[in-house]
Image (spheres, grey):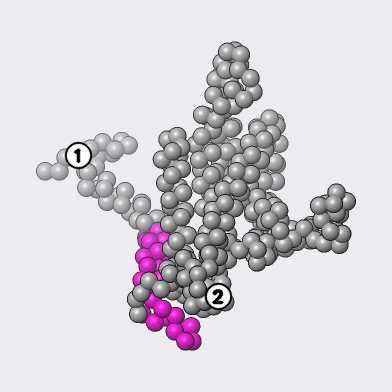
Amino acid sequence: MARLLVWYGELATARSLFLRGLLLVLPGLLWLLAFLVLPGLLLLPLSLAERGSFGEVVWTFSLENYRRLLGFGVLGYSPDNLLALLRTLWVALVTTGLCLLLAYPIAFFIRSQPPRRRYLYLALVLIPFWTNLVIRTYAWQLLLAPEMPLARGFSALGWLEPGMALFPSGLAVYLGMVSAFLPFMVLPLYSSVERLDESLLEAVRDLYGGPLRVFLHGVLPQTLPGLTVGVILTFIPAMGMFVVPDLLGGAKHLLVGNLVQQAFYTMRDWPYGAALSLVLIVFTLVALRLYRRYGKEVELA
């Protein structure tokens, strides 16, 4: 006889509760299986295949695409791909760090406002999401054009030749990346800042702690959950970004995302694009693993 359990005021068996829970999580599992797990698994055999003469996939397996990725081509060795991998990691780390530096003051500013006005400022943070990323990136091209005040200011300081735009350049790439990902850092961080326990901050001040100690011992431990979510939401998409570097960085600031985009759409070399995509996924997972291993353990829920 099945053992009866009391679940929210009703009698149920363990089997019925299991089936009920399975039905609840089944749509999410199917979604992840169809759009994440299966495409990811298909990348592995595709990365071992070869490109045919007309761009078709030839299912002859070899490690040639990974040799090309390491820089061994028909014209000899070239470190361009490895440099793109390192540049991608560096740009993602710098973008995450800059977003973090900007997100804390923004989150505290919103928290300092009256409750009704906070929604207005949160809406201002969300407004960039209402516009497509490509359009926002083209808007940055207009803002960084030679006749705009920013470029003229750089020219007046002697940092830029007169009549030149601020793009393509590394500065333009970081401006575009930070503006694209800043909301992903601000929103989860604000959710933690809003719930700060003021008594803990007062305790640190009572022990003669300065602003830095108040932040390190009072603010940072309480905002770690939001900080962790913000870092993950910023770092992962930054690793695969190709629109901003393509429009604002030019050929000198190509990232792995640009190489993947060129492999699939320009070169029609799907096996090579699959190899690049797999390496990008591995880089992302390793970085997240290192962050979770050497960072402090926090509950994300």
Residue at 34% of width from left, 76% of height from top? 61
**Quarter holding the N terminus?**
top left
Q: Nearer the viewer, residue 9 or 223?
A: 223
Residue count near mark 1 (Cα–Cα under 10 Å), binned few <14, some 14–19, many ≥20: few
Residue at 68% of width from left, 65% of height from top? 250
The residues bearing labels 1 and 2 have C-alpha atoms spaced at a distance of 58 Å
Residue at 42% of width from left, 68% of height from top? 66
Residue 219, horizontal then vertical, whole percent: 57, 28
What amino acid type is highlighted by mark number 1? Leu
Residue at 36% of width from left, 51% of height from top? 24
Residue 2, horizontal then vertical, whole percent: 15, 43
Callout 1: SS: strand
| Residues drawn in magenta | 30-59
Residue under label 2: 265
Q: Are marks 1 and 2 in contact (CB under 8 Å)?
A: no
Q: Nearer the viewer, residue 35 or 274?
A: 274
The residue most toward the bottom is 54
Residue 38 is inside the magenta segment: yes
**Does residue 31 appear anywhere in the picture?**
no
